[in-house]
Image: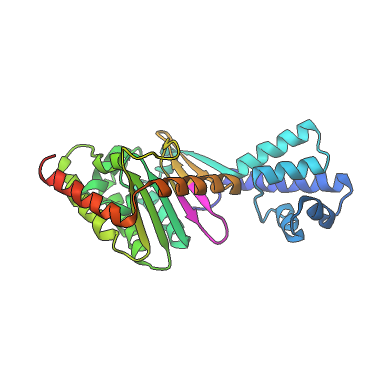
């Protein structure tokens, strides 16, 4: 997923504005770096637009350089625009559901670690074909009717699970295990799929039971992609997809995932939980 045109423009304008503020303050890049406790290369990369500063870093830069209220406000606006992309689902799905799956697969190929939290349904990387079909049929806003192709691409994405150089840490709530759009028959094969994937050496799956203290408010699901150059978080709302790259925000989601992980069942206990749930479903609960 490449940087949007709007993000690129905001990054470039922010770089120019921050450089201008530094020059107006009479400080060299080295002096500014010393004051902020950064490396000189970090200052240089930000001024050349090669690195997107976090919101807090951009504001600290502006304040140290004596920015007035108007300039500080503009720095904040540009930093926010450069770090957050909000796509309406109609925009994300313009090229069809299958194309969107390919875009996500490209991110997963670059990631060293993928952290996932899902409070409402089984994440795409773990879905069976039948389960994915129900999910994607409900999500189709493109009007292209390419659900079958999208299901095929989603299953192709799952090949990433078998590349041991990428780690996957899944946490999902007990409620997510029960979700189904129509046919309850998808549940049993889906549990079997989770049990199978959980045996992979680079994958951990943990369940957060309904009666367990969660440690944080599970307000929405998210995916955190740890990449060498820039980590990002993807949050899906009912109408939009949010792509967050602010290092401070990414760190907050990293902590949130850790909290859910600590409160969830262990890997071994999760397996026992899934086996018991499988029996309940098989018995008609």
> Which residue is painted at 70% across and 46% down in the image?
57
User: Residue at the bottom extreme?
Assistant: 164
User: Residue 29's x, y, as percent?
Assistant: 82, 55
The answer to which of 269 and 157 lies nearer the viewer is 269
In which quadrant of the rendered view does residue 200 lie? bottom left
225 magenta-colored: yes
> Which residue is painted at 87% across and 44% down in the image?
24
> Which residue is painted at 54% across and 54% down in the image?
231
The answer to which of 238 and 169 lies nearer the viewer is 169
> Which residue is painted at 58% across and 46% down in the image?
5
18 magenta-colored: no
In which quadrant of the rendered view does residue 145 lie? top left
Q: Which residues are magenta?
A: 224-233
User: Residue 51's x, y, as percent?
Assistant: 66, 54
Q: Is residue 129 visible?
A: no
User: Residue at the top extreme?
Assistant: 69
Classify residue 39 as left or right of residue 107: right
Establish if 65 lies above or below 41: above
* The C terminus sits in image quarter: top left
User: Residue at the right extreme?
Assistant: 26
Q: Is residue 89 visible?
A: yes
User: Residue 218's x, y, as percent?
Assistant: 41, 37
Classify residue 72 as left or right of residue 156: right
Classify residue 251 as left or right of residue 160: right
């Amino acid at each position: 997923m490449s940087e949007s045109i709007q993000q690129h423009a905001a990054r470039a304008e922010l770089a120019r504005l921050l450089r201008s503020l530094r020059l107006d303050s009479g400080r060299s890049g080295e002096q500014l770096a010393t004051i902020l406790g950064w490396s000189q290369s970090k200052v240089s990369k930000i001024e050349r637009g090669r690195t997107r500063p976090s919101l807090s870093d951009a504001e600290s830069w502006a304040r140290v350089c004596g920015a007035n209220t108007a300039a500080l406000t503009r720095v904040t606006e540009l930093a926010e625009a450069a770090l957050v992309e909000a796509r309406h689902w109609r925009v994300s799905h313009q090229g069809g559901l299958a194309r969107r799956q390919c875009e996500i697969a490209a991110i997963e190929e670059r990631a060293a670690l993928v952290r996932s939290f899902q409070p409402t349904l089984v994440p795409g990387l773990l879905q069976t074909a039948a389960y994915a079909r129900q999910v994607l049929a409900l999500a189709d806003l493109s009007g292209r009717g390419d659900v079958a192709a999208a299901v095929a691409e989603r299953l192709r994405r799952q090949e990433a699970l078998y590349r041991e150089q990428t780690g996957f840490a899944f946490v999902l709530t007990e409620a997510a295990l029960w979700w189904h759009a129509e046919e309850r028959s998808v549940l049993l094969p889906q549990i079997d799929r989770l049990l199978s994937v959980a045996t992979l050496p680079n994958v951990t799956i943990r369940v957060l039971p309904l009666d367990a203290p969660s440690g944080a408010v599970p307000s929405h699901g998210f995916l955190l992609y740890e990449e060498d150059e820039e980590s990002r978080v993807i949050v899906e709302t009912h109408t939009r997809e949010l792509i967050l790259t602010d290092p401070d925000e990414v760190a907050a989601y990293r902590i949130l995932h850790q909290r859910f992980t600590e409160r969830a069942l262990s890997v071994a206990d999760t397996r026992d939980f899934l086996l018991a749930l499988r029996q309940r479903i098989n018995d008609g609960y």
